[in-house]
């Protein structure tokens, strides 16, 4: 039986406890390579997500005002806002707006849902970008039509690259 000295007392440690802790350490060390990688999404990945989410509807251009900086000096906090041109009546309103970042490991950044009582279809947030990439906003209207806007954001490190 091994003994470990803690301050002024000696606490016995059994061989079984030592083996148990060693086994836990081996399991933890073996699990590290199983952690997911940092692979980036692609434009095709985003297109597939949009097609699946919106029932294969072909996105049209227009109606979405996507506001992003052209150059972001810090990819950790990039402001984004969207505004969709809609009367927001019970017959014609924006149901949802989803924002995607084509080069992030997880491309879906945010989804905002609206009702006619929202008054305006407008939202803003901050997002993290893994590097220079396109940001895509997709709006689904109450009649099932889908609109899309896309802008490129150049992410630099301290303003010294792109």
Image (spheres, rainbow, N blue to C red):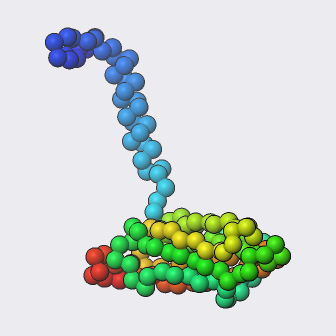
User: Residue 32 placed where, x, y %?
Assistant: 42, 47
Residue that extends furthest to the left in the rendered view of this protein:
8
Q: Quadrant of the N terminus?
A: top left
**Above or below, comparing residue 9 to residue 44 in the picture:** above
Total labels: the figure holds 0
**Above or below, comparing residue 5 to residue 39 in the picture:** above
Q: Quadrant of residue 89?
A: bottom right
Q: Nearer the viewer, residue 95 or 115?
A: 115
User: At 49% across and 55% down in the image, what residue appears?
Assistant: 36
Side of 31 where 140 appears, left or right? right
Side of 29 where 108 appears, left or right? right
User: Residue 29 placed where, x, y %?
Assistant: 39, 42
User: At 48% across and 80% down in the image, what residue appears?
Assistant: 68
Side of 11 where 64 appears, left or right? right
User: Residue 71 placed where, x, y %?
Assistant: 39, 83
User: At 66% across and 88% down in the image, what residue appears?
Assistant: 62
User: At 47% across and 51% down in the image, what residue appears?
Assistant: 35
Q: Is residue 159 in view from this perspective?
A: yes
User: Residue 67 placed where, x, y %?
Assistant: 52, 81
Residue that extends furthest to the bottom in the rendered view of this protein:
62
Q: Quadrant of the C terminus?
A: bottom left
Q: Is residue 46 in view from this perspective?
A: no
Q: Quadrant of residue 12?
A: top left
Q: Nearer the viewer, residue 123 or 49?
A: 123
**Above or below, comparing residue 34 to residue 73 in the picture:** above
């Amino acid at each position: 039986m091994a003994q470990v000295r803690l301050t002024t007392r000696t606490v016995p440690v059994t061989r079984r406890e030592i083996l148990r802790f060693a086994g836990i350490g081996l399991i933890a060390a073996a699990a590290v390579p199983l952690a997911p990688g940092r692979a980036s999404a692609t434009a095709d990945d985003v297109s597939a997500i949009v097609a699946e989410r919106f029932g294969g509807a072909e996105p049209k251009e227009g109606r979405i005002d996507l506001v992003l900086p052209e150059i972001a000096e810090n990819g950790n906090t990039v402001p984004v806002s969207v505004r969709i041109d809609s009367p927001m009546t019970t017959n014609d309103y924006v149901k949802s707006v989803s924002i995607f970042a084509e080069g992030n490991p997880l491309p879906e950044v945010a989804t905002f849902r609206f009702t006619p009582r929202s008054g305006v279809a407008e939202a803003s947030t901050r997002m993290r970008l893994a590097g220079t990439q396109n940001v895509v906003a997709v709006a689904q209207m109450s009649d099932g039509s889908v609109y899309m806007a896309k802008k490129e954001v150049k992410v630099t490190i301290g303003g010294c690259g792109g």
